[in-house]
Image: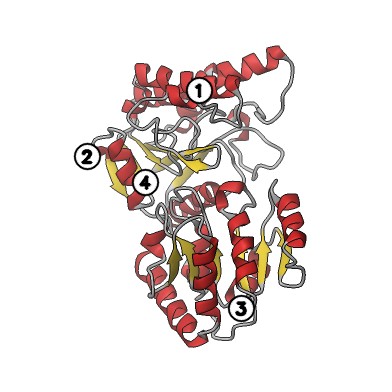
Amino acid sequence: MTILQANKFHYVKGGSERYYFDIARSLEEAGHRVVPFAMASESNEATPFAEHFVSEVRFEHEGSPRERMRRAFRVLYSVEARHRLSRLLDEARPHVAHLHNIAHQLSPSILEPLSARGIPIVQTLHDYKLACPTYLFLSHGRTCERCLGGRFYHATRLRCNRGSLAASLVNTLEMYFHSLLGSYRRVDRFLCPSRFLLGKMREAGIEDRRLLHFPYFVFASAYRVSAAKRDHAVYLGRLSREKGLVTMLRAVAFAPRVRLVIAGEGQLRPELESLVETLGLEGRVTFAGHLRGEDLHALVRDARFSVIPSEWYENLPYAALESFALGTPAVASRIGGLPELVRDGETGLTFPPGDAGAMATAMESLWDDPSSATSMGRNARALIERGY
């Protein structure tokens, strides 16, 4: 078969892109032809189909009023994306389309040419965009479900998009516009990596027949396990506020025996470095920066446990999947899809999100009981081999 894969980014920017490339690899290894459609970028992986990609847009740049207006209209409906995809479909003639993150940079306008040609459409849901205008069920750092069920005006009322009235209004209009158009009615099946996300989509009004639990996966053979552990715990992932990293550092301050390595980059790093100094954690907390490949594997493989302190509804994070594939258990917040992986006392320990004291207790418990950590690590690896 020829399978179209559409995602806003054609390089590994986060977990959703990781899955986008991994599923393409799996399909190609099974003998299928995969055709990508994305946004143009200097960071993109090479592909012979790049000439069909839509022009690059960066929403983090302010620009002139005219540029901001043009970007707003592109969020609502991208004529360029619709036209460029139409030409690609005529050339590649895919049998099925697999969509990933398409909002904003591509927009749901691309659903029209697919539907018009009778191409079956599935979409993997990497976040909560169909129910929350700003993706994350977060408003000013706190979980929020006010928009669930189509009450999207709350995003504007609360200025959920970085405190900006204009940006929040665009997100609200986008949701109502595509609800009126019935854009996402063209998607035949929504693939939900976690059962938690599937439940939220059900609450949002999507029919059960269109929802399938379809988890992420890792290539387990690429992850070597070792029983030897060193004197550190590890956080791996993006350094952003919803990840609960401020709470994590406060928990380390309450757990004086724990040493932590933070592997990742993000806009929150300067604030975290300052907090390390304020809390007197120099020497116990180390920033390793962005690591990839064997450097990252070695750090996680050798850790006593990984820490996943998220304070938003995590879907099915690769931080947990990779940690488990390397035989390392996790201390994780009890939120979103995390408890589906981090099973208390079996593959790690959990704590209430945002509770630094409870996180510290869980970390010290595993730190002081290496045999339990080793046993949970074996269970974690077995879970990967069995189901992911």
Q: Identify the amino acid type marked 1.
A: Thr
SS for dot 2? helix
Q: Are marks 3 and 2 in contact (CB under 8 Å)?
A: no
Q: Identify the amino acid type marked 2.
A: Arg
SS for dot 1? helix
Q: Which residue is mark 3?
A: 302
Q: What is the number of the mark on residue 61?
A: none
User: What's the distance in space between the residues labelled 3 and 2, CA to CA?
Assistant: 43 Å
User: What's the distance in space between the residues labelled 4 and 3, CA to CA?
Assistant: 31 Å
Q: What is the number of the mark on residue 156?
A: 1
**Residue placed most toward the observer, 158 or 294:** 158
SS for dot 4? helix
Counting from the top left corner in percent of width and height, residue 144 is at 44, 38
Q: Nearer the viewer, mark 2 or mark 1?
A: 1
**Residue placed most toward the observer, 167 or 378:** 167
| 138 w.r.t. 311: above or below | above
Q: Quadrant of residue 289?
A: bottom right
Q: What is the number of the mark on residue 209?
A: 2
Q: Identify the amino acid type marked 4.
A: Leu
Neighbours of disc 1 within 10 Å: few (<14), some (14-19), many (20+): many
Q: Residue at x 43, y 39 (%)?
A: 128
For residue 56, say whether it is visible: no
* Sequence order check, earlier mark of 2 and 1: 1
Q: Which residue is mark 4?
A: 197
Q: Would residue 365 be found to the left or right of residue 122 on screen?
A: right
Q: Would residue 9 be found to the left or right of residue 103 on screen?
A: right
User: What's the distance in space between the residues labelled 4 and 2, CA to CA?
Assistant: 15 Å
Counting from the top left corner in percent of width and height, residue 62 is at 72, 24
